[in-house]
Amino acid sequence: MSEASAPHAAERRELTTVQRNAVAELLRVSPVADELGRRFARAGHELHLVGGSVRDALLSRLGDDLDFCTDAHPDQTLRIIKGWAESIWETGREFGTIGCQRDGLRLEITTFRAEAYDQVSRNPVVEYGTNLTDDLRRRDFTVNAMAVSLPEHRFTDPHGGLDDLAAKIIRTPGTPAESFGDDPLRMLRAARFAAQLCFAVHPDVRTAMTSMAADLDRITAERIRDEFTKLLCGTDPITGLRLLVDTGLADRFLPELTGLKLTIDEHAQHKDVYEHTLTVVSNAVSYETDGCDFVLRMAALMHDVGKPATKAVGADGRVSFHHHEVVGARLTKARLKAMRYPKDVTSQVTKLVGLHLRFYGYGRGEWTDSAVRRYVTDAGDLVDRLHKLTRSDCTTRNRRKAAQLAADYDALEERITRIAAEEDLARVRPDLDGNAIMELLGVPPGPLVGRAWQHLKELRLERGPLDRDEAEAELLRWAHDQGLR
């Protein structure tokens, strides 16, 4: 271990544990990593396990994706791994990266490099470096600027990453201004690591994030989207979201989030809509059962973004946000499209935002079985997420009110279960299909059949299943009213 990474006396016990965990993690991948290191050494080149792989090994969370750096150029790397790797891919070749697979491990091998922006371009300019020291200096944060040489297992930590890892601090190897000037996306990545690792951002880093936030405009929407997705799916997304707002980074790509701070909620509680939204996101996380549900988390984040545009103060001084779910759905669709999210993700999140208020009013006993059918049908395969979003949206500190809302939603879910047991709610269809409609009305395929089908579906939602005779009678009655018979 280098002197730069030697632990302080007060930290020695903790760091020893960290190092012990790292040894155990590295031993698991050593057969492949060391064999690869020996192949590079025989070819006269260096190979080092580096960056996130070393960090994650020290945190006892090393996965099956390993990152390496080397002085070998891509063509030389290809010659070294050919015949040894089970599969090879070159999708990152323009950035000096060659990927391969061996014994269930995915390995990415990148040539030493110095990467920087030209202050105008939205993409990095890649230049190959010549040594490990320079390569580590150009990395984003000290906790990602550590390396283990292979096969010797020599640990290199010139910027005190091990100490920062123990202290749970995010710092840059050089000055934050230099680091963020090279790649402005690193500002967003700092917030992402705060959310993923539950680390604190060093004050100097935070100051630079604030003063340089506008530089994020030089980054493509796709790269911002990918970092933000990882942030929102972090262990502690609330910390990351607060950093984005407090530093002004959110204003550059998600201004709706900052806008929520200016809007007091309709109940005139002590919290503004921004704080309420963060609580809803936190609640949504608690309802997840199988890892991050990005669609649910994003819907929770965006569910009230329509409030600023719909805020109104009545004669009695009460604040209202009529139809904010409709406006919010429109804003959500536009924002996710601008961030280049896939159409299916955009559609799902937008739909949840538009439906998140449907439940309110159920407790007054006004919902018929028809209303329940429509609730389930409109939600479709998002109904389980809608349940979670609606429950997450209850953030009142009034225990009696919170208990009543929970009881009302329990009752709704029980009612849905009961009706679903009697009817196939997941596949509500008219009681007559298109062929039956055409045969009964004596018409060919066309828009008329679709209108008839939609009429029968509305009846199905309103009255539940009809037997064949009832469905035929209703269709003929509709045809008569349309002047068709």
Image (spheres, rainbow, N blue to C red):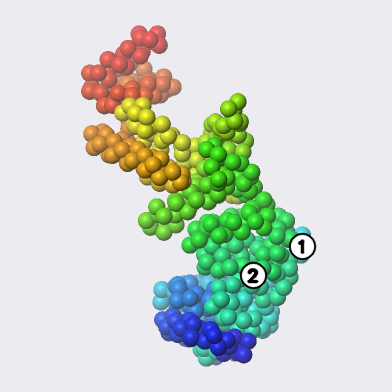
The x, y position of residue 174, in whole percent, is 70, 75
Residue that mark 1 sits on? 119
The reply, left or right, for residue 429 in relation to residue 130 is left
Q: Quadrant of the C terminus?
A: top left
Secondary structure at numbered mark 1 = loop
The reply, left or right, for residue 262 in relation to residue 379 is right
Query: Is residue 205 shown above or below 407?
Result: below
Residue that mark 2 sits on? 202
The x, y position of residue 116, in whole percent, is 72, 69
Picture residue at 64% right of the left edge, 84% below the top: 158
Label disc, if present, on residue 84 of the rendered structure: none
Picture residue at 63% right of the left edge, 48% below the top: 258
Is residue 57 visible in this depiction of the protein?
A: yes
The x, y position of residue 357, in whole percent, is 46, 36
The x, y position of residue 347, in whole percent, is 50, 42
Kind of residue at badge 1: Gln
Foreground pick, 84 / 213? 213
Foreground pick, 69 / 449? 69
Quarter of the image where one finds residue 5: bottom right
Quarter of the image where one finds residue 402: top left
Kind of residue at badge 2: His
Query: Is residue 234 shown above or below 371?
Result: below
Query: Is residue 76 shown above or below 417?
Result: below
Picture residue at 48% right of the left edge, 62% below the top: 235
Secondary structure at numbered mark 2 = loop
Foreground pick, 51 / 187? 187
Characterize the local packing of mark 2: few (<14), some (14-19) or many (20 or more) Cα atoms within 10 angstroms.
some
